[in-house]
Image (spheres, coloured by chain):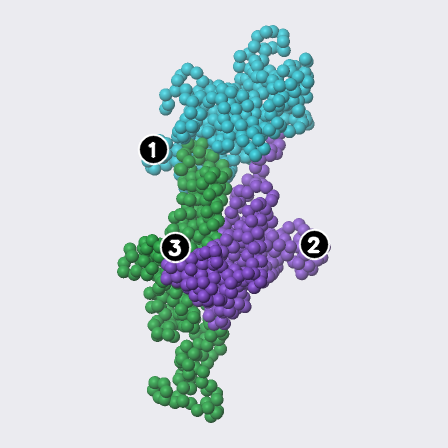
Chain colours: A green, B cyan, C purple
Amino acid sequence: MVGFVVRRVAALVAVLLAVTGLAFGAMNVLGDPLFNVVGFIASVDCDAVAAGEVDDISGQTAGGRGDCEVIAEARREHHLDRALPIRYGYWLGDIVRGDLGTSFKNEMPVREVIGEKLPKSVLLMVVAQVIAVGLAVPWAVAAAYRAHRPFDRASTVGTFGLVAIPSFALGVILFYLFVVRWQIFSSRYDDTDLWSRLRSMVLPGLTLGLPAAAVYMRLLRTDLLTTLQEDFVLMARAKGMSDQWVMFRHVLRPSLFSLVTVFGLSTAGMIGGSLVVEQIFSIPGLGRALVEAVIRDDFPIVLGGVVVVATGFVVVNFAVDLLYTLIDPRVRADG
Amino acid sequence: MSTASAAGPLLSVQDLGVTFGTADGPVRAVDGVSFDLTEGRTLGIVGESGSGKSVTAKALMNLLPSYAEVEGSITFGGRDLRALAAARERHFWGVELTMVFQDPMTSLNPVKRIGEQIAECLRVHLGRSRKVATAEALDLLERVGIPEPRKRLRQYPHELSGGLRQRVVIAMALACGPRLLIADEPTTALDVTVQKHILDLLDDLRRERAMSMILITHDLGVVKGRADDVMVMYGGRTMESAETPTLFGRMHHPYTRALLETIPRIDAPAHTRLVPIPGRPPSPAEVGRSCPFAARCRHRIDDCLDGVPPLVPVPVGAAGAEGAEDASHHSACIVSVGSDGRGDS
Amino acid sequence: MADMPAPGERTPDQRDSHLHVQDLGSEVSVRGSYEALLGGQVFDDSKGSRLGVFFWLAVGWMGLVVVAAVTAPWLPLADPDQTGFGGRLDAPSGDAWFGTDGNGRDVFSRTVWGARISLVVGFVAIAMGMVFGGALGIIAGYFRGVVDRLISFVMFAMLAFPGLVLALLFIATLGSSLTIVSVTLGLLAIAPVGRLARAATLLYAEREFVQASRLLGASHGRIIVRELLPNVLIPMSGLALLGMALTVVAEGGLAFLGLSVSDGFSWGKLIVTGAAPRTLREGPWVAMFPIGAMFLTVLALNYAGDRLRWFMDVRELAFER
């Protein structure tokens, strides 16, 4: 068990290094960090100034220093005069010390920004997954209980259609019906208390949760049907257990493997989906902040967001691995 | 525990028929099977795979899938089992009659602790508290001869060997004190060395609890000395039925003889050849026009192909010598086969 | 007779397979990713060996969309960019089948034209995924060892990286030309395809025909191209259709972030335009018709892909141990 945990933590660290390295590299290669730190004067050709070919337009910035002084200072401060891997090293060092940096744009500490935005996104995820699992389990049980009957067949068609609706399209449709047409929900995110927050999450949660429910339902139904063929199900019935008892006490748990696996993997998909859904339903969550930060080249926010998202993904999948051992004692043997 | 009528058999099966609706048309897996089982006795049902013996057991246990069509009557302790099944009175099974399956590897739920699985019946049907049920489960584990029972209660099935698992399955089946235990090939999946222990255990438990038992097997040798009555099935029909000593003493049906010849005998001279039965059992789809065994029978005559032979009482003594019949000995063969194994008609 | 094998009864080998729990984790994860990518198998209970009527219906719809997209310039359609083709937000009618948008442009014509970008992005992206992901997966699965561990780790990292964020990074900085958008989405397709190709290769690399050609002294290249490629990638054609569906949807997602293809318009962009609350209130058709077109196309791709996958029996390779 200890070896298991150590290996998982090592994997988490490795994945985080790879992911942040990728993001850091991409941002620094594709964008120009200097531009974000000092603004338009970043385009001043300081080599030319040094060579005396161009005048330094001094005194235009605060403190009356020359542009090139400002640039040089910014370079030092942000280690921009060093090679990319070393810069990554500095950034990593800050992260390890718990310093995620400050936003280029509004000087807000990244930690504060994430602290403010993340709970909303997490709430969205939780609502969506609760809806997905809460729908999928009873639905799959009902379909598997009377497999190949009309309800089951209709469900199959239904899930197929549900999976084929892109999440943003579903969002637009729900928005149209519930906000524009019937005006059951407000179009704005209401942050006054937990109740209003939950209410604001219903439509976005459905948008993310319904397609996931369809996926979960299909997986679980198939696994339930497989488990129903097992001898121990006959044995339980021979012991006089009712159909419901057999289904929920004997069949459900051994059938949860695929569902749990996909639950973990679908978290990544949901994070992607939440970027769009937060946009449609104007939820001021991490996804929106991330999108804005990427578009404005606000590196620290983007990197901070990526760290949080990747950590979340790895942690969820780690939890899924632990769940396996809860579901099936046989997995513990080789854990 | 139950208020059964003292008179009459515990279990009475009349004209049981089971038909499966399949994509290739209806398949008759059991056809016209009748038998009585008196309280405290053991009935051995013997036959090859596909003979309909397991389907018969599942029909008794209300375990057939929904596409199976059941006919005939099944009466248990004076109650109509098919009516109970239709009324979804599932709790009757498990308490009054229960079943042990062939493969202990798969008949235990892999994700539940053994103690929990044994106690389940007690808790659900008899409303025992968790504590009482666990104590009873411990007693049961002890009784079926499992070492370190207290430790086993908290173990999972995969931590046990096949023989121990079958003991757990038996403990589980016995938990609610059933009056009838159906054991479907309880030892087939086990090591030869373990088989005898399990069979002896079943026998002891049956005696101790004055329980009735149906022992289903493909091995006539298993039945000998353990069952009071034997019913030989083939192609979904009863071929021969009798009290065990009678059957082994005056075997009438060629199929029963053929079955016996396939069993290795410890007392036979060395290098005695086992005689396999040529051919394969008919598939249930082929059943219905002739004696099901006709295709593989050494004693076949033309009449065998002309209609299904009825199950009739076997005359006592040499064929046709006296008019007396043994009321308990029936056979479904129109050819009278002498004790030397040759047909004489 | 005791050992007479009976049809339908378990052989000892099959019984043992219940106990192969040490493989359980890996099997589940392969199966899981597979199912996650494909959204679970559908109609697993289908019998028979034909693709079925609905498969051909789906293929028919895809054919119709492709033909319409390719021949759009020659079709008797209104100019999709012509403002004032009709009034502002006209309801669907005989003249404008899908109505007109806020600028009086013909939504039907725009939907047909929008298919061009959506399909190109989908096709390029999944082709990239199949080529690079397939190659990496086969190499990892065939050579095993360090190569495998390295490639598998990179793939896992790519999966852990939220795809849309990566796409954002690339497109926001490199611009949203058709090429950049297609290639970015193609990059995202590499990891999932690669994982599956690897799993399939692991299976086939142990099969007799591969072992045999290895014994006969065939080079690695030859074995990979002649023996593994057809067995791993061709059955994954069903997967290509499913992947294409995912990419078409992903492009739509980008459109919602304002990062859709800048030169021209896709279905996603049409939907975004129509999804503005005011447009949605006064002319829901502007959003709903492109949504319908996208839905039907994704449905057709999913169904055909699922059917094809079932037909090619790729399931076997994902579930077998």
Taking the image as shown, residue A123 lies to the left or right of residue A13, namely left
Q: Which residue is mark 3?
A: A174
Tell me the mark number nearer the camera, choosing from 2 and 3.
3
Taking the image as shown, residue B16 lies to the left or right of residue B272, namely left
Tell me the crowding category of disc 3: few under 14, some 14 to 19, or many 20 or more residues within 10 angstroms, Cα based. some
Residue A217 drawn at (x, y percent):
45, 47
Q: Amino acid at mark 1?
A: Gly
Question: Where's the N terminus of chain C, which quadrant?
Answer: top right
Identify the residue shown where x is 39% and y is 20%: B4
Helix, strand or loop for disc 3: helix
Helix, strand or loop for disc 2: helix
Query: Which numbered tag is attached to residue B127?
Result: 1
Q: Amino acid at mark 2?
A: Ser
Quadrant of res C193: bottom right
Residue A266 drawn at (x, y percent):
45, 55
Please tell me which residue lies in front, B114 or C305: C305
> Residue farthest to the left?
A192
Taking the image as shown, residue A112 lies to the left or right of residue B15, namely left
Q: Which residue is mark 2?
A: C213
Tell me the crowding category of disc 2: few under 14, some 14 to 19, or many 20 or more residues within 10 angstroms, Cα based. some
Tell me the crowding category of disc 1: few under 14, some 14 to 19, or many 20 or more residues within 10 angstroms, Cα based. few
The reply to whether dot 2 and dot 3 touch (C-beta < 8 Å) is: no
Q: Is residue B153 visible?
A: no
